[in-house]
Amino acid sequence: MRKADVGRLGLDFGVGIPEKRTAGHAEFLGTPGAVFEVKRASPSRGDIAPDLDPVALAAAYAEAGAQAVSVLTEGNFFKGSLKDLVAVADLMESRRRRGLPACAVLRKDFLLFEDEIDVAFRSGADAVLLIARILDDERLVGMARRAASFGMQAFVEVREPDDLRKLDLATRALGDDAARTIVAGVNSRDLATFRIDPLVPAALRGRLPAKAVFESGVRSPADARFARDLGFTGILVGEAVAKEPALAAEVARAFGEEPRAARGRFWRELAVRRAAKAGAPLVKVCGIARTKDGLFAAESGADLLGFVFARSPRRADPELVREFARAQRRIQEFSNERQPLLVGVIAETESPEARAAIALARDGHLDALQCHGFRPGEELDDVARYCAVRVGSASDLAEAEALLKGGEPRLLLDAKVEGIAGGTGTRVPEEALREASGRASLWIAGGVTPENAAEIREKFRPELIDVSSGVEKEPGVKDHGKIRALFEALGK
């Protein structure tokens, strides 16, 4: 459709843009910050803010502390126009001259031709979006070079392995200029299904240049903090702030907070492991109370090991965790193979057991905490953690929904048995799992055994399976034969 529009209307789509650039220049993502969009509609949501005033909205973004404004100029699905780009660029130049907060300006469109970079420059853009998936090697490199020749940044969007190859090609082609002129972005939204997954950018962050943007999926300040924790230098936010401009300042402020290093490390590592699984589930063996059980589970292929810090027959000793963590580090140094992530399981934060787990996480002996009974917005700022929700029926998913809306990237669904916190051998009801699978990637605990693991995988395609009592001789004592059978059943 866009090629047909260009053939019919030309590269300026019939809009009278300036013959020469009149706006000044600001470096796109010269400093870390939020990029907010002037966006009337989208293919996934339809109309978002069809009557927005691009100049008024861009001014509000600048006042809210945005580093850049992204202007959609695509007309068929986003209802944008080059007129919007010219107007916003002129506004930012006027604000700079008056000493008011101003932003860099990004042209966001399905750009296909090198000459479109010239059009964007004359219209006042400081950067242009180049979608690696829709450009061949030669075209992407040529467009990135053209942008650099104007002193503009090429914002290269990647998601698939071949996109990363193209990004590397463009980076090498620009040489010493690449650090200044190329910014990478990862779209957390799958453009085929429109489903959002924040672990996709998490998995790719380590393969991107220093300046990188987390795209899509930021709907709240908590989402913005998560992206910052992952090490991204920018977030691209569209629908949330276009519909509710007052939210922009909160999102920008949250992204500007100091990254929580432990949280970022855990989720990046987990995301990389998930990506390497090629569709097979991650496996967490929980209730480790003996060193030899943990070592056997690790050798068998466990991705995470759980240590219970609550009143339970599976309660772990803190010294066991310290020794185990040190042993795992020695094994990894010797073998250069990834060892399981170590997780402390807590029911609240004030008991002696929970405080011991938190201390172990702060000291680096635990990679994360699994928190039962946490409320939306409840934090442990200096350690990584995820939440578990006990589910006895589909009606219990309201709590899970609230946590997801509060910014949780993943939740563990555990079986609900009154008076017992976990390790019951009871399964989450199937109707609840089916409903939950439509909302987020499934992490399943409760009643998993070597006998039913393959069935659970086939029925629900979980991203993570958590097993405890299903591979035990007795509480706190693992059955190595059952652990081996579990991994055989899962095809590992």
Image (cartoon, grey):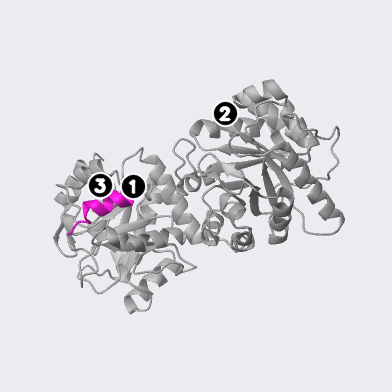
Q: As drawn, is 191 to the left or to the right of 370? A: right
Quadrant containing the N terminus is: top right
Outermost residue on the top side: it is 7
Residue 420: which quarter of the image?
bottom left
Three-letter code for the amino acid on which mark 3 is drawn: Ser
Three-letter code for the amino acid on which mark 2 is drawn: Ile
Please name the residue that numbered disc 2 is placed on. Answer: 134
Outermost residue on the front side: it is 51
Residue depicted at x 25% and y 74%: 311
**Mark 2, residues whose alpha carbon is within 10 Å: few (<14), some, or many (≥20)?**
few
Please name the residue that numbered disc 3 is placed on. Answer: 300
Please name the residue that numbered disc 1 is placed on. Answer: 463
- The residue range painted magenta reads 426-437
Q: Nearer the viewer, mark 1 or mark 2?
A: 2
Provide the secondary structure element on which disc 3 rests: helix
Q: As drawn, is 265 to the left or to the right of 342? A: right
Three-letter code for the amino acid on which mark 1 is drawn: Glu
Residue 221: which quarter of the image?
bottom right
Separation of residues labelled 1 and 2 (CA atoms): 29 Å
**Magenta span: chief secondary structure:** helix
Q: As drawn, is 87 to the left or to the right of 311? A: right
Separation of residues labelled 2 and 3 (CA atoms): 41 Å
In terms of depth relative to the viewer, which is nearer, 394 or 180?
394
Residue depicted at x 49% and y 48%: 202
Place of residue 109 in the rendered image (x, y in percent of width and height, measured from the top left)? 64, 36
User: Which label's residue is closer to the chain start, 3 or 1?
Assistant: 3
Separation of residues labelled 3 and 1 (CA atoms): 18 Å
